[in-house]
Amino acid sequence: MSKNSLSEALRLLRSYHDLSQIQLASDLDISRSYLSEIESGKKQPSLELLKSYSSRFGLPLSAIMLFSESVESGPIAERVRKASTETALKLLAWVEDRRRDKLSA
């Protein structure tokens, strides 16, 4: 299974909060290797685990689910969903880069 937008969003969420995989895995009560598989797209997180992410980061579950849900079917809705997901991921990656630059300065 290849890396998907949900796995990338979960990785960036962890990175944004400056947490290691070990720290977050401990907070979520899962193994670091399982977290790594989720972030690499090799495993899909359960709804319960996504609820744990929601609670841990103080985000609505719907914000996290944006990266995996289809709003509706059809080519236009799919393009809109894909574009908004890609934009959100680019924004999170940009924030991660700024934070990394700030830490290395």
Image (spheres, rainbow, N blue to C red):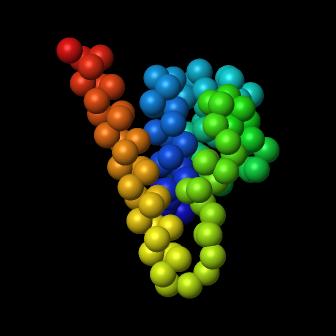
Q: Is residue 53 visible?
A: no
Q: Residue at x 45, y 31 (%)?
A: 15
Q: Is residue 70 visible?
A: yes
In the rendered image, the residue lying farthest to the bottom is 74
Residue 72 location in percent, x, y? 63, 76
For residue 56, side relative to residue 102 (left or right): right
Residue 77 location in percent, x, y? 53, 77
Please tell me whether residue 12 is drawn above or below residue 62 in the rendered image. Answer: above
Residue 19 location in percent, x, y? 51, 23
Please tell me whether residue 82 is drawn above or below residue 74 in the rendered image. Answer: above
Image quadrant for the N terminus?
Answer: bottom right
In the rendered image, the residue lying farthest to the right is 48
Q: Residue at x 67, y 23 (%)?
A: 26
Q: Residue at x 45, y 75 (%)?
A: 79
Q: Residue at x 48, y 81 (%)?
A: 76
Say which quarter of the image contains residue 49.
top right
How many marks the image carries: the answer is 0
Residue 96 location in percent, x, y? 36, 33
Say which quarter of the image contains residue 32.
top right
Residue placed most toward the observer, 82 or 80 = 80
Image quadrant for the C terminus?
Answer: top left
Residue placed most toward the observer, 13 or 1 = 13
